[in-house]
Amino acid sequence: NAGVTQTPKFRVLKTGQSMTLLCAQDMNHEYMYWYRQDPGMGLRLIHYSVGEGTTAKGEVPDGYNVSRLKKQNFLLGLESAAPSQTSVYFCATEKNPQSSYNEQFFGPGTRLTVL
Amino acid sequence: AQTVTQSQPEMSVQEAETVTLSCTYDTSESDYYLFWYKQPPSRQMILVIRQEAYKQQNATENRFSVNFQKAAKSFSLKISDSQLGDAAMYFCAFSNTGNQFYFGTGTSLTVIP
């Protein structure tokens, strides 16, 4: 099992360009999350999904869009990248917060630089 | 709103010694979970230990243990017999029974040979 994978691992964009980050999981988890990690700020939740076809905003959703068309994939889109979006992006999954076992599993991260 | 505070941006420990990382949180809920995640230079987030708030017994995983003080809203991580491989960023996290995790800002642990 691959667990949680993220594509790409690194990317450099110019201001105004668009891109999509892909998160894929083979654990059949219901919940998926996108975080960004910035120095001194820990992980901040961008968007999350509680199931196929559903998405919700997290703490810092502005400038990002997401889609969960298939249960195993969660896409994070940047329509017009800005330097403030330079960060490391992590995808995470969770089986079901209502279950007795509560843990998030993380992907390896994507380092994005916006020039 | 839930908040998680890690007041130690950096810590260091001699190899084979013991170190304690601090974490406090704020919540009005009574049922929740607490976690410590480790992030080595590879960036991969790895779960170290978890604690259910309804359990009074402190969780232990080999050399890692926690001191959970529910009334004080404190959740510290103790690493015994520190090893070079323990060097990493450590994040404390809180989760209610809903669907969001809240992370602290992290503590960078250096292990001195």
Image: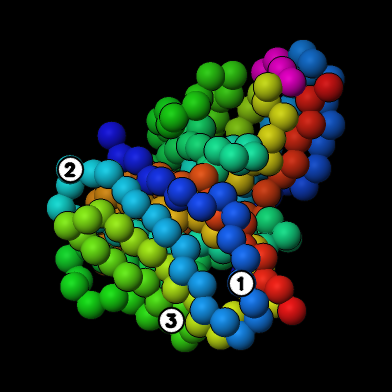
Q: Chain of mark 1?
A: B
Q: Nearer the viewer, mark 3 or mark 1?
A: 1
Question: In this rendering, is residue B74 above or below A90?
Answer: below
Q: Residue at x 59, y 61 (%)?
A: B11
Amino acid type, callout 1: Val
Q: Residue at x 18, y 73 (%)?
A: B56
Residue at mark 3? B61
Marks 3 and 2 share the same chain: yes
Question: Magenta region: which residues?
Answer: A79-83
Amino acid type, callout 2: Ser
Is residue A80 on the magenta stretch? yes
Q: How much space separates mark 3 and mark 1, taking CA atoms?
A: 19 Å
- Residue A48, given in percent of the width and then of the height, sits at 45, 38
Q: Nearer the viewer, residue B86 or B34?
A: B86
Number of disc labels: 3
Marks 3 and 1 share the same chain: yes
- Residue B85, given in percent of the width and then of the height, sits at 68, 76
Q: Earlier in the sequence, mark 3 or mark 1?
A: 1
Classify residue B31 as left or right of residue A80: left
- Residue A102, given in percent of the width and then of the height, sits at 35, 61
Q: Nearer the viewer, residue A35 or A95?
A: A35
The answer to whether mark 3 and mark 2 are in CB contact below 8 A is no
Q: Earlier in the sequence, mark 3 or mark 2?
A: 2
Q: Chain of mark 3?
A: B
Residue at mark 1? B13
Amino acid type, callout 3: Glu
